[in-house]
Image (cartoon, grey):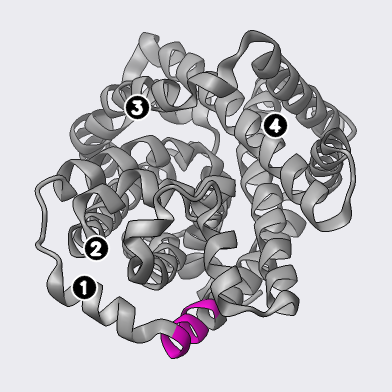
Amino acid sequence: MNDFFRRYLLPGFVFEAAVIGGGYATGRELVEFFLPAGPLGGLVGMVVSMVVWSAVLAISFELARVSRSYDYRSFTKLLLGPAWFLFEIAYVLLIVVIFAVMGAAAGEIAHDLLGLPKLAGTLLMIAGVATVLFYPSAAIEKFLSLSVGYLYLVYFVFLTWSLVSFGGRVESALASAPLGSRWFMAGVTYASYNVATIPAVLFCIRHLTTRREAVVAGLVAGPLAMLPGFAFYIAMVGYSQEIGSAPLPSAFLLAKLGAPWFAWAFQFGVLLTLVDTGVPILHSINERVAKVYEERRRVMPQALRPAIAVGVMLLSVFAASAVGLVGLIARGYGLLTYAFIALLVVPVLTIGLYRIRGLTSSGRA
């Protein structure tokens, strides 16, 4: 992995891996957030999300670089002071919701593709994430880079094939539909709850050595993370009237393409996104624990990393199912969105800039 990739592209790849998950990868989130604004309005809303991501990420990366805050505990202490624990509470709740969704998605895909019990699919996802987390940060970076590269390839083929198969419908939908009125709020809302995964990217900010690298990496991360979304959204607007009621928009479009072999390749990519999302999010938990060990002049045992990951995933999946959180996903995301606007987006854009100026003037940049 060369220095250019590590410094300018890797943070964006890791951020994309953290946000994509099962909902983004299957198109369900895109339908829920952007399609109500209309085919064209949804596309503009995605641009809004991308711009918000780029702005918040650029400032966050530079703040993490100059303060050497590579775990979310150190990072949020800079932003929120004694109130940093409020972010941790919201972050843990988000993790529960994310893994509740991912566990259900893994079970459904494993059942549909392989005929396995849904519980087996969930446990396979947990095992896959835990296995990757056993390795150090450098190996995790390579895994995420390769898997995201595969996803870009799959989505490029998906978009190209869709345009060849029903490009006329896509062109007609984009040309005839009005802009709509919900695109701005859709973009801000989607960006705000996904930007909460910034802690999952902090571990790779160690590679950044200058302000230019941090800012460019942050600005590039927004487009890198939204690129698969643009591809999927453009492909699905040709069937915008029908696809809204489809549980899995990806399955709906794959059926229109009529290629079972590509359906397998795409579904494998979706399964990979579940691991991709789980790895950086849980790695951020491990890095937070490792920082506590470091402050106590001790080294975190390597075996503790997958153990924490398995514990968090099992707790999230089964506790969410028992308490009924899966049925409250929409409301949970809504409440957490407002929490992260207050605890991360606004502080980064205000206090974050102030902290950067202070650290720079003190000679730590």
Q: Is residue 92 above or below residue 62?
A: above
* Above or below 270: residue 157: below
Q: CA distance from mark 4 to mark 2?
A: 41 Å
Q: Which residue is mark 1?
A: 174
Cα gap from disc 3 to disc 2, whole angstroms: 28 Å
Residue 254 location (% of width, % of height): 59, 70
Foreground residue, 101 or 356?
101
**Disc 1 or disc 3, which is closer to the eye?**
1
Type of amino acid at the residue the image marks with label 1: Leu
Please tell me which residue is depicted at 18% across the width and 41% down the height of the picture: 185
Q: Main secondary structure of the magenta part?
A: helix
Of labels 3 and 4, the one closer to you: 3
**What is the CA distance from the residue labelled 1 to the residue labelled 3?**
32 Å
Q: Is residue 200 left or right of residue 48?
A: right
Q: Which residue is mark 2?
A: 39
Q: Residue at x 77, y 40 (%)?
A: 107
Q: Residue at x 78, y 52 (%)?
A: 112
Left or right: 188, with 93 as reference point = left
Q: What amino acid is labelled 3 in the image?
A: Phe
Estimate the spatial distance between the alpha carbons at disc 1 and disc 4, rounded to whole Å.
44 Å
Q: Is residue 252 left or right of residue 56?
A: right
The answer to whether the residues at label 1 and label 2 have Cβ atoms under 8 Å apart is yes
Of circles 1 and 4, the one toward us is 1
- Asked if marks 1 and 4 touch (Cβ < 8 Å), the reply is no
Q: Which residue is mark 4?
A: 286
Image position, residue 203 (x, y; %): 58, 45
Callout 4, which amino acid? Asn
Residue 190: horizontal and vertical position, in percent?
33, 42
Q: Position of residue 224 (x, y in %)?
A: 43, 66
Q: Is residue 94 above or below residue 280?
A: above
